[in-house]
Image (cartoon, rainbow, N blue to C red):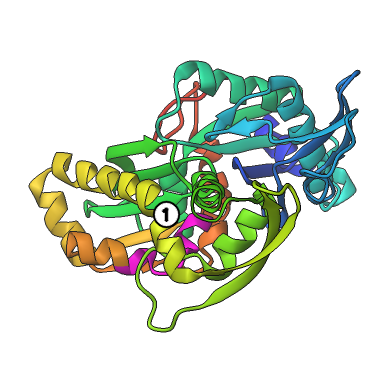
Amino acid sequence: MSTQCLAKMFSTDIGIDLGTANCLVYVRDMGIVLAEPSVVAIKESTRQVLNVGSEAKSMLGKCPCNIRAIRPMKDGVIADFEITEEMLRYFIQKAIRTVPWRKRLLHPRVLVAVPSGITEVEERAVIDAGIQAGARKVYLIEEPVAAAIGAGIDISKPDGHMVVDIGGGTSDIAVISLSGVVESASIKVAGDQFNEAIVKYMRRKHNVLVGERTAELMKMQIGCVFPKEQETSIEIKGRCLVTGLPKVINVSSTEMLEAFEEPVERILEAIHGVLERTPPELVADISNNGIVMTGGGSLVDGFDKLIEARTGIHTVVAEGAISCVAEGTGKSLDSLNAMTDGTVNLSRRKQMS
């Protein structure tokens, strides 16, 4: 029996969307088995990990002085190597517990989705963290390629498709044809920057300080980047910067348009820049096929309408936009056996081990 057959019998393959805000884990033949926030709670003095994922996120902004809830991923890349390693180990082990016992005998192979603008040093950090966390081998795939596959686009054809993946830390814009990225841009403006924009707006306009979780809630409930037919509003609580006391204030969706203006413009500029650099034949394809949006940031109300209005190209938000990268990474696991001698035959065409 070949080594490959033995490995298939006694181990499994895992796809990971290692996001700044959330981590989704896909196990071969099982689908997405885990979706948790990329947050870790640690003890300050010893850096001992206390909680990971949802439990750690519930502690954000509410910890005593000796405990800190942190996001070890920043702008789509590893900001704290040791804590990312611990977080990955936790997620991999939790995912492995869902497979039959005989498939746990060997360490899994892991395919990780990374931003298209990642540097070689940042690549190496992801690979090392994966190996240290218990992976047998670590492969990489670019997020927009994984998002396109997850959205159901056949990327193998000589046909141009544009994917706009707006995550928590980065927005990745890519034109894909013949299974590769023809032109792309990766900017560090995404969901987290929308939250920061809300915090700044509330401070500037209302003299009220709100926390990250409140800003996230506002973004999800009344956030919009294109005028709504019917205005919505939400009552939020924060700390008045004048009196220092709690204050309740009513905020409308129209105010969110103003708050989001700067980050949204930067994303639109990046889309425009990619289109300008794309060969004309592929631009014609994109005009026919439209633009596909994925990632949690694409769910901000009216984003597809705004891009369509500014580019003149039909734009849609993919079904299951949040899980597209994880789904695409999972579907790409079937290609792992074709990756020989350190070659990833997907987008980056590179594998380090």
Give 111 or 2, whichever is nearer the viewer: 111
Q: Is residue 185 left or right of residue 17?
A: left
Q: Is residue 16 left or right of residue 281?
A: right
Give 329 or 225, whichever is nearer the viewer: 225
Q: Residue reaching furthest top?
A: 121
Q: Which residue is mark 1?
A: 260
Please determine whether, in this image, residue 117 is positioned above or below residue 319: above
The span picked out in magenta is 296-305
Q: Residues within 10 Å of mark 1 (few under 14, many from 20)?
A: many
Q: Position of residue 303 (x, y in %)?
A: 38, 63
Give 323 or 100, whichever is nearer the viewer: 323
Is residue 23 among the parts visible in the rendering?
no
Q: Position of residue 56 (x, y in %)?
A: 82, 44
Main secondary-structure element of the magenta-colored stretch = helix
* Amino acid type of the residue that numbered disc 1 sits on in the rendered structure: Phe
Please determine whether, in this image, residue 125 is positioned above or below residue 71: above
- Name which quarter of the figure residue 246 lies in: bottom right
Q: Quadrant of the N terminus?
A: top right
Residue shown at the point (86%, 22%) measured from the top left: 47
Residue shown at the point (87%, 40%) measured from the top left: 51
Q: Position of residue 205 (x, y in %)?
A: 49, 54
Q: Position of residue 23 (x, y in %)?
A: 66, 46
